[in-house]
Amino acid sequence: MSLGFTEIILIVLFILIVFGAKRIPELARAMGRASYEFKKAKNALSTEGQELMNAAEKAAAKEEKQEKEQP
């Protein structure tokens, strides 16, 4: 399901009527900031998760090495 040219024009006109021409740039800036913050938080969580996985793997390898050394 895709939007045709007519549907896009109707959506733009609706937005202009509801929000007005002066408010649209403010909304676009707010959406841009929100998108940036979301991406930043997503990357931070991804990095933190990767660091936790690396730490868990190192701890498991260390534990395995200690088990092999014990008779």
Image: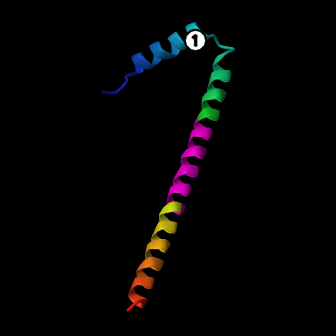
Please give the name of the residue rendered at 41% of the width and 21% of the height, measured from the top-left corner.
5
* x and y percentages locating residue 63 in the rendered image: 44, 77
- Front-most of 28 and 39? 39
- In this rendering, the count of numbered labels is 1
* Furthest residue in direction bottom, as rendered: 71
Q: Does the magenta stretch include residue 22?
A: no
Image side of residue 25 versus residue 46, left or right: right
Point out the stretch of residues depicted in magenta.
Answer: 35-51
Q: Kindly report the secondary structure that dominates the magenta region of the rendered protein.
A: helix
- The residue beneath circle 1 is 16
State whether residue 53 is above or below residue 38: below
Please give the name of the residue rendered at 60% of the width and 45% of the height, measured from the top-left corner.
40
- Front-most of 57 and 35? 57
State whether residue 28 is above or below residue 37: above
**Which part of the image, by quadrant, shows the C terminus?**
bottom left
**Which part of the image, by quadrant, shows the N terminus?**
top left
